[in-house]
Image (cartoon, grey):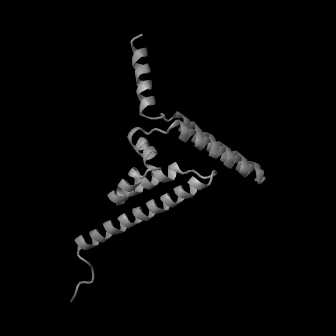
Amino acid sequence: MRETHAPPPLREAHGVRLRRWAWTAAGALMVLLGIIGAMLPVMPTTIFLILALACFSRASPRLEHWLLQHPRFGPPLRQWRAHRAVSRRGKAMACLGMAIGFVAMCLGHPPWWVIAMVGAMEIAVLAYLLRRPEGPAAIEAESAREDGNSGQ
């Protein structure tokens, strides 16, 4: 009688391939959404690219490297990965985009509870974003200030 099941190593290899494919597909979708966000002021870019980077780091070192070395998107992604930092310009663009999107949404006269819910989410995102450091120079300056104050 022949066995109909694949041996465990083959089954495990198939599972690994399937997971890598799923992470790669998710990363590609995030890149697509990030590119759309780069063209539309009401949609974010960076968060989708950060998510794409996380997906690619689990699936494809080649695509992860490509994204990190991309001339336009690579520097902010490297800054985020190394320092969890967002540049001043990135913060300003995110705030502007969120404000434009919120105003555009309000012009469509949604119910009050939609405005309240979206407004609360935007405030939470802005609070998180604005608390992020602005990069290596800002992190070093903040560290130096803290060291100077600790001796007093």
- Residue drawn at 64 percent across, 42 percent down: 96
**Picture quadrant where residue 15 is located:** bottom left
Looking at the image, the residue that sits furthest to the bottom is 1
Residue 27 quadrant: bottom left
Q: Is residue 64 above or below residue 11?
A: above
Residue at 49% x, 62% y: name it: 29
Judge from the rendering whether residue 1 lies leftward or rightward of residue 40; answer left or right.
Answer: left
Q: Is residue 63 visible?
A: yes
Closer-to-camera residue (71/4)? 71
For residue 88, side relative to residue 148 (left or right): right
Q: Residue 20, percent across and down?
A: 36, 64
42 over 96 or under it: above or below:
below
Q: Quadrant of residue 122?
A: top right
Q: Position of residue 138 (x, y in %)?
A: 45, 29
Residue 26 x, y percent position in the rendering? 45, 62
Q: Residue at x 27, y 80 (%)?
A: 5
Report the front residue among 116 and 51: 51
**Residue at the left extreme of this rendering:** 1
Residue under the image location 43 percent in, 30 percent down: 137
Image location (x, y in percent) of residue 6: 26, 78
Instruction: Give the total of numbered labels.
Output: 0
Can the viewer see residue 113? no
Q: Nearer the viewer, residue 122 or 12?
A: 122
